[in-house]
């Protein structure tokens, strides 16, 4: 009986937990706040829906919601921070036929943008 | 208060409160069992005998009820036992085995265990066998074959199932050897379009395991892009303009469109791809 009592307590307590499992990826050296500004300034929202950026309603590319939970990037590559930074800077180099253009931004700006995306919901 | 003289309306209240309390307690107990993980989902753990019996009977009654409308055609005319054997060999053998032939590892260690069809084929009417083969059995390893085998193929399989219990191991081997030149026929049409049929197709091709799809109940998945409101998208896979024809082309041959894509070739027949593309381009706000 005491065993089940602790189960009951545990069940109630656990009900309030967020999802468990592996920690989500994050970009080292990337600033989330600056990233939001970058995504806004480079008008990424012209092609993508981006959470937290109201003007970002584009449907040319996929929505970037729940970005951290996506196992894959651009349907071809593992979704890892370094991959994403590369992709943002020069997508055609990675996937020649893609409709996404290369973006003339700095490495740091790309890191910041990636950091923001990994935190998006 | 004098004994035995509780007012009638008080009794009614007690009963009502008691009933509500029971429901709340039951829901609470259910929540505890669910959240604590105390109920084992392991395929290695045996059911209680009563649970097993209920599930077994439940399947029988459900199939009987739902297969009642199925009209069995003249199998001698419509079905070809050699085709049925080809379908059995290609699709059924791996889980159900055959006379003298073991099932593949896939078919072992399942709960419920895929039945040895020598028995079911004798006991179950042809219409019921057809229904189970065509529609599958949820929460078991039995898939629905409706979208993978043509209707003639399904009836041929049923005809073969009826013949199989009559075979010795040697006779089965002989018969199997004589039908290696025959293939199990795939469907060549999709039937009349309906959103419900499209949804069944998505599940049959496992699309909803990688993509969120409008109107479907399934895993919340981010492996592929969401297909909700798909008609608003400008590109397919970032390379192909999003039209219905291009979408069909993509579904049928993803690697032909984008060689390194992670989307696999699911062997989708074109009429089904067209059906699903129509759904994607019309459903959703």
Image (cartoon, coloured by chain):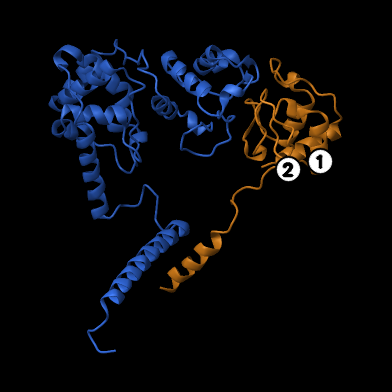
Colour chain A appears in: orange
Colour chain B appears in: blue
The residue drawn where x is 46% and y is 38% is B217
Give the structural element (helix, strand or loop) at label 1.
Answer: loop
The residue nearer to you, when weighing B150 against A43, is A43
Residue B180: which disc?
A: none
Up-down relation of residue B29 to residue A67 (above or below): below
Up-down relation of residue B9 to residue A70 (above or below): below
For the C terminus of chain A, give its image quadrant.
top right
Q: Give the alpha-carbon distance from disc 2 to disc 1, as whole Å.
A: 8 Å
- Total marks shown come to 2
Residue A30: which disc?
A: 1
Residue designated by label 2 = A26
Q: Quadrant of residue B271?
A: top left
Circles 2, 1 touching at the beta carbon (< 8 Å): yes
Q: Specify few, some or many for label 2: CA neighbours under 10 Å numbering under 14, 14-19, or 20 or more.
A: some
Q: Quadrant of residue B74?
A: top left
Q: Position of residue A27 (x, y in %)?
A: 76, 40
For the N terminus of chain A, give its image quadrant.
bottom left
Q: Chain of mark 1?
A: A
Q: Position of residue A56 (x, y in %)?
A: 73, 32
The residue drawn where x is 47% and y is 38% is B218
Q: Chain of mark 2?
A: A
């Amino acid at each position: 009986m005491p065993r089940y009592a602790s189960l009951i307590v545990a069940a109630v307590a656990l009900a309030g937990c967020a999802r468990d499992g592996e920690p989500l990826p994050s970009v080292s050296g990337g600033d989330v706040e600056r990233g939001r500004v970058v995504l806004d300034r480079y008008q990424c929202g012209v092609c993508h829906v981006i959470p937290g950026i109201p003007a970002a309603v584009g449907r040319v590319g996929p929505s970037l919601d729940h970005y951290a939970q996506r196992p894959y990037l651009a349907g071809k590559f593992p979704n890892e921070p370094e991959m994403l930074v590369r992709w943002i800077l020069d997508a055609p180099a990675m996937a020649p036929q893609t409709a996404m253009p290369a973006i003339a931004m700095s490495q740091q700006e790309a890191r910041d943008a990636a950091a923001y995306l990994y935190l998006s919901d | 208060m004098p004994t035995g003289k509780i007012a009638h309306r008080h009794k009614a209240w007690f009963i009502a409160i008691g009933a509500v309390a029971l429901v709340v307690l039951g829901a609470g107990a259910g929540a505890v069992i669910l959240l604590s993980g105390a109920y084992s989902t392991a395929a290695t753990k045996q059911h209680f005998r009563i649970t097993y019996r209920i599930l077994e009977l439940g399947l029988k009654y459900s199939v009987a009820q739902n297969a009642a409308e199925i009209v069995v055609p003249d199998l001698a005319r419509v079905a070809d036992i050699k085709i049925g054997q080809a379908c059995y060999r290609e699709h059924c053998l791996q889980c159900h085995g055959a006379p003298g032939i073991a099932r593949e590892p896939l078919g072992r260690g399942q709960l419920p265990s895929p039945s040895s069809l020598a028995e079911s084929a004798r006991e179950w009417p042809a219409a019921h066998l057809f229904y189970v083969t065509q529609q599958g059995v949820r929460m078991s390893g039995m898939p629905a074959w409706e979208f993978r085998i043509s209707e003639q193929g399904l009836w041929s399989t049923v005809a073969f199932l009826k013949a199989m219990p009559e075979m010795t191991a040697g006779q089965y081997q002989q018969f199997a050897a004589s039908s290696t030149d025959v293939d199990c026929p795939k469907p060549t049409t999709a039937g009349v379009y309906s959103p419900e049929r499209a949804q069944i197709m998505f599940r049959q091709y496992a699309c909803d395991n990688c993509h969120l799809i409008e109107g479907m109940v399934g895993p919340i998945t981010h492996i592929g892009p969401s297909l909700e409101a798909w008609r608003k998208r400008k590109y397919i896979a970032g390379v192909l303009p999003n039209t219905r024809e291009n979408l069909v082309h993509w579904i049928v041959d993803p690697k032909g469109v984008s060689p390194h894509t992670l989307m696999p070739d699911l062997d989708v027949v074109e009429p089904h791809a067209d059906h699903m593309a129509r759904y994607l381009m019309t459903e959703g706000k």
